[in-house]
Image (spheres, grey):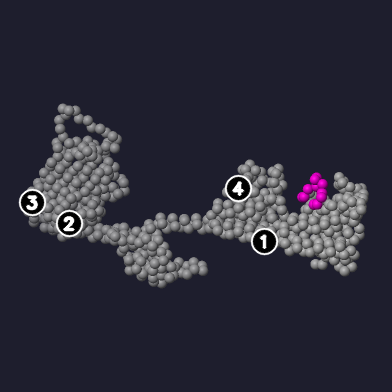
Amino acid sequence: MALFSRASLPRSPDRWKAALEAALEVSEIATSQAPLADAVAQMLSVAVELLGAERGSIMLLKEDGRTLVLMAGHGLPGEVVVGQQQPVGEGVAGRVLATGRPLLLGDVDQDAFVNFVPKERRINSSVVVPLRTQGRTNGVLNLATNQRGSAFDEEDLRLAQLFADQAGAVIHRTKLHERAERRSSDLMALVESSRGLLGSLELDELLQHILDGAIRLSAAPRGFVCLLDESHRIERGMFRGFTKDTIREVMEHDEVTRAIDFHTVTTVVGPWPDLLVAVGLRTTRGTKGVIVVAPEPGPVAERHDLLMAHGQQSASALSAAQLHAVLQRRESELEAIICGVPNPIVLAGSDSRIVALNPAAEMLFGVSASFSAGAPVDGSLAHRQVESMLLAAGEQQAEVVAGNPPRTYKVRRTDVRLPGAPTGRVLIMDDVTVEREIAQTQRDFVAIIGHELRTPLTIVTGFARTLLTRGEKASPEDTKEALATIDAKVGQLGRLIEDLLYISGVETRESVLKHEETKVAELFGEIAEESLERFPGREIELDVPRKLVWPIDRTKVALVLRHFLANALEYSSEPEPVTVRARELENEDSLLVEVQDRGEGILSTDMPHIFKRFRQIDSSSTREHGGIGVGLYLCSRLIKLHQGRIWADSSWGKGSTFSFALPHPQSGRNVVRLKSPGAAE
């Protein structure tokens, strides 16, 4: 802009030259982009030189519109310092700013101005002009001289006003430039804060970023951020430069409560030395919180806007972090459930590639979930039937055999549909091996029990009908033989029913042990004699110390030995004897019993099954001897009631040895047996 109009040109060529030079210097200051304080000081120096003043000052109006602040001074007394403030309307400068009209003063009438500050040195003449921009006064230029012969005139006043108008425009542009730079810097800081917020989904780390951003935006040396629970108590937070007691006091302040409740930004004035700014936070899940900082002095409105924007971004980031935490927790819960499920589970995508396997599926198919993820289904599981089900469309069910050792699985395959996502497939396998074995066992049991009941019943029925129809014609010997056969078969049926009832009692935990000190040799002798009655002509060797006494349940141990002897006598032939041995294992504090026969033996493939319920060794010889497969199972249950062990050793064609060991009932009570040196063995 031009400094002078044609009508206001100075009459003196020297003044004209000085005015032009001043205009050029102001233009240079305007293009130098110097900071506002430096630009004002430079322009004051130009004005002092232009009018030949001895003193000068430039005061600018603060943004509150109520206060003038001294920005630059020349030749001022020592008590007047840059930064000193003066209310609008007071003193000469306040009057000029309030009226917007310049003043040319000689001797100043102190009573004419409110709160006029007397000067130590007499001022002979002064010009005080407003700094105006676009019709608005934003400051005051004051120039003064003490020399009587150099008083300012109307031309000086007009020249000072024209200079002030150009200086005011430069000051306004400089302010706008600084404000734009500050705004740009603030926006960049807001962008950087936003990046920090977007870079984390972990709550504690995110709270740290929120606090860092607020401190950076407000140029605050200290602050804190916290989230509240439903009772408005601090649940978690971060703080810097605040003590816990101060935080507690700040949180109880009404303005802070207002900021939290209304999700706004407020200024907080309290007993603490700093002015605080509080920004309320509220997430989409309803969680409330607050950011509190102690900003350095500056444009309050701009700080509030920035902090409010930062608070909104922080609330959005906290909402995302909370949602992430919920999803992560649910994912962990789902993963824990899936990993804890014993059923193998395989998830495939719509592209027929493996998405995930649980540990049970990894173990079953012998693959790794991490390496299999993303691999094609075809060929990844090494099980053609399962892979075909995963590749097929629609819901499917089937039973497959998989694993080593092989087990039976019921397989269900269903589609997984998620909104906005391609359809995947999930395959779940239920282990039904036990159910199928039980079903097969039941079928076998029905067949065996039918056979075992039918055979003696057929014989009993035949002999009974014979006695009924021709009993009067039969000789006493034939009648006695028929009755003996009937009695034997009825006894066989009784033992069969007794074994079944005994098993039922054991499995329902109705059986209890009744230990009593027993002479082992005497008990075994009785059972051996009883067993030989069913097998006349056979021989049993007893290798049992006569003095061996052991606390046992006589009835149950007798039943076990009876079954052992019955099997040994049935599966061996004359004249080979069956041997029964019993001895005390002092190192284990247990009683060892062995029953050995020299019969046909048992195949190694059948050994794992001989103590199972309703299992028969699959050979023609065993079916010849009958039985329903409950004897050895019952023996194993009775020995386990004694906390003992039962096992068998056999060689095909050389015979078998069935053994059991019974611990002493007091062996768990640290019972020590002592023998005197002269005690007999």
Amino acid at dot 3: Glu
Q: Is residue 39 above or below residue 394?
A: above
Quadrant of the image for the C terminus? top left
Q: Position of residue 358 (x, y in %)?
A: 40, 59
Q: Disc 4 vs disc 2: which is toward the camera? A: 4
Q: Position of residue 444 (x, y in %)?
A: 25, 59
Amino acid at dot 4: Phe
Q: Which residues are magenta?
A: 73-83
Q: Mark 3 vs mark 1: which is more N-terminal?
A: 1
For this orientation, the residue located farthest to the bottom is 393
Residue that numbered label 1 is attached to: 184
Q: Which mark is residue 603?
A: 2
Q: Position of residue 541 (x, y in %)?
A: 11, 44
Distance between mark 4 and mark 2 Cα atoms = 78 Å
Residue that numbered label 4 is attached to: 239
Q: Disc 2 vs disc 3: which is toward the camera? A: 2
Q: Residues within 10 Å of mark 3 (few under 14, many from 20)?
A: few
